[in-house]
Structures are given as structure tokens and as C-alpha cells.
Amino acid sequence: GVQITRPHCNLEDIVSGVAAITDGSSTSVISAAGSGVKVYITSVIIANSSATAVTVDIRDGAAGTVKATFPVPPDGGGVVHAFQVPLPFSANTAVCADPSAAASTVTVTLLGFKSKV
């Protein structure tokens, strides 16, 4: 008999993904959610173990529109960002991370939810 409220979605609609990228190419972090289903990103965590500073684009598909760009410092540097307003992506499209250069390892973690709205 207790009402429970959650920000953004029900538990079954939470999505997350992690990608370790070494070649500087656009890589899927969260797969396409299906016909008519959009992904909304709420949090981004990026770590850079290389000696090279990079920027990381969060893309709507592998070669799609850049939705956000994060500067990531070298040598174990990183960035953590929580969107106050969830960042929407196109329906049935993967959410990808695209580092600006090859680096020993850039690890991208994305958290969010899926919705038909």
C-alpha cells in the first residue's frame, strides 16, 4: 500500500551500456531498442587510460548526429555528467560513442531509459 515514484521510467525500461574503445571509431554503446522505441540518456561516464586527451561525441547512430561532446583528459582522467533533461535519440537507433582519436582505452558508460514517447 505505498506509492513509489521514480524519475523518468519503470525499472523494466532502464537501459545501460559500456564500451571500451581503442581505435577511435564510432562504437555502439546501447543497441537500438526496436521499432518505435527511443532511448533517452540520463548519465554519461567516460574514462581515458591513455596519454592522449580526446573528445568523445555521443552520436545518434554510428555516423549520425552528434548529440553531445565531452572533453576527456589523459592519464586516467574522466568525465561524469548527469543530464538534467534526458537526452533523446531517434527511434530504433543505437546510441554510439565516437572518440576523436585512437587511444589505449577510452571507456564509455551510458545510462538511461527507453520509451515509445
Image: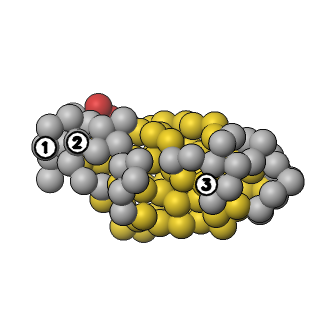
Question: What residue is shown at x 26% (from left), y 36% (from top)?
Answer: 33
Question: What residue is shown at x 41% (from left), y 65% (from top)?
Answer: 67
Q: Quadrant of the N terminus?
A: top left
Point out the tag, 1 or 3, that comes first from the N-terminus. 1
Q: Is residue 66 left or right of residue 10?
A: right
Point out the tag, 2 or 1, that comes first from the N-terminus. 1
The label number, if any, that marks residue 99 in the structure image: 3
Frontmost of labels 1 and 3 is 3
Question: What residue is shown at x 30% (from left), y 38% (from top)?
Answer: 32
In the rendered view, would you say 22 is above or below 48? above
| Dots 1, 3 in contact, CB < 8 A | no
Residue 84 appearing in the image: yes
Residue type at tag 3: Pro
Question: What residue is shown at x 36% (from left), y 49% (from top)?
Answer: 61
**Mark 1 neighbour density, 10 Å: few (under 14) some (14–19) many (20 or more):** few
Where is residue 91? Give x, y as percent: 21, 48
Q: Secondary structure at mark 3?
A: strand
| Dots 2, 1 in contact, CB < 8 A | yes
Q: Secondary structure at mark 1?
A: loop
Of the pair 73 and 83, the residue shown nearer to us: 73
Residue occupied by mark 1: 36
Where is residue 53? Give x, y as percent: 77, 62
Residue type at tag 1: Gly
